[in-house]
Image (cartoon, helix red, strand yellow):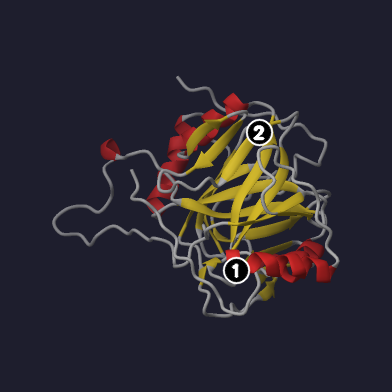
Amino acid sequence: MNKPLTMAQTKRLGVLAVHSVDEFVIAVPNLEVAEEFYSLFGLRVEREGDALGLYTYSSAHRYGRVILGPKKRLQWLTMGVYAEDFEAFKNHFKAKGIPTIASMDPSSSEGLWINAPDGFPIQIKVCEKSSPSMPPNRVFAPESNGAGRSPNKSKVQKVHPRYLSHVLLFTKSVKASLAFYEDVLGLRMSDSAGDDLIAFVHSPHGSDHHLLAFLKSDDYGFHHASWAVDSIDEVGLGSMQMAAAGFKEGWGVGRHVLGSNYFRYIQDPWGGFCEYSFDIDFVPHTIDWPAANHPPDDSLYAWGPDVKPDFGLNYEASGQEFVTNRTPTN
């Protein structure tokens, strides 16, 4: 089991910004299927009333919640802020003319609630920073000393991700989303590609290269959650662990250009993805990242297999029903 994970509470002075994606909430049509999938992926899944809580084995933090609904659908995002910034955010929203809305969480009325440009709710809540405050852990095989450096397959243990690195959302307008998350929530662009195609944002209080990303679609939706692991071996072993359970569809193993991380995406039972990610770029709270717009052909991946044809398809909005192609196991 992984060692306990703690996140330093770094803060860029004089900057009003959210510090973390505290939690994502999605609906799916079958909680038993969701419980099995996320457990197989390596998360700690807890039954919490009529919902599932998604945790890692390294932290007590709940990174996601899954509730029952007629189809897969993004419900809301919860963004974390420091206690000393909460009143400033209230005043900031008033000055920007951003109306607050009623809580969408039947279990809590905590924090402030506003609508994203696409129409889904966002909760602003005081909480500890759960996004990383230092570069992610990077485990490499030791130098040879009379023995091979590869792990023995017979001794391989189940892969358990360390923390939620980022979430990628579908959006009707990348430009409008980028403007909102920068101007209203204080996030900063890391990189983008094309004209209104995709963009990545980080927290100025310190985070991975992106804690949120936006991909152009006809409507909002939840594309994937990316979970950090400690080594490239764990990316590959996680892929094998899911394939052995029948989840062979996805994309990777490969390496991204923007963010630099090694990846393997596992397609979930509703057409979205869960990503094993290793060695993503990190943006400290002490620097300004040199943001840039990149050509699409030079922004997705440096190497890896061809992109899965439906990788960019928003099944929440396309009208197409995803039919799981899980391979039965013996």
Image quadrant for the N terminus?
top left
Image quadrant for the C terminus?
top left
Tag shown at residue 203: none
Q: Secondary structure at mark 2?
A: strand
Q: Is residue 326 above or below residue 87?
A: above
Q: Is residue 305 above or below residue 131?
A: above
Q: Is residue 220 above or below residue 302?
A: above
Question: Does residue 194 appear in this view?
Answer: no
Residue 236: x and y, percent?
43, 46
Q: Secondary structure at mark 1?
A: helix
Q: Nearer the viewer, mark 2 or mark 1?
A: 1
Disc 2 and disc 1 in contact, CB within 8 angstroms: no
Residue drawn at x 60%, y 36% as measured from the top left: 268
Task: Looking at the picture, tell me which residue is in the foreground, 281 or 12.
Answer: 12
- As drawn, is 207 to the left or to the right of 309? left
Instruction: Name the residue beneath numbered marker 1.
Output: 84
Near mark 1 (Cα within 10 A), the count class, few <14, some 14-19 or many ≥20, is few
Residue 322, quarter of picture: top right
- As drawn, is 318 to the left or to the right of 111? right
Residue drawn at x 41%, y 43% as measured from the top left: 57
Near mark 2 (Cα within 10 A), the count class, few <14, some 14-19 or many ≥20, is many
Question: Does residue 27 appear in this view?
Answer: yes
Residue 215, quarter of picture: bottom right
Residue type for callout 2: Ile
Residue type for callout 1: Glu
Instruction: Name the residue beneath numbered marker 2.
Output: 67
Task: Looking at the picture, tell me which residue is in the foreground, 182 or 274.
Answer: 182
Residue 259: x and y, percent?
56, 65
- Give me the C-alpha separation between circle 2 and circle 1: 32 Å
Find the residue positioned furthest to the left. 146
Residue 243: x and y, percent?
48, 34
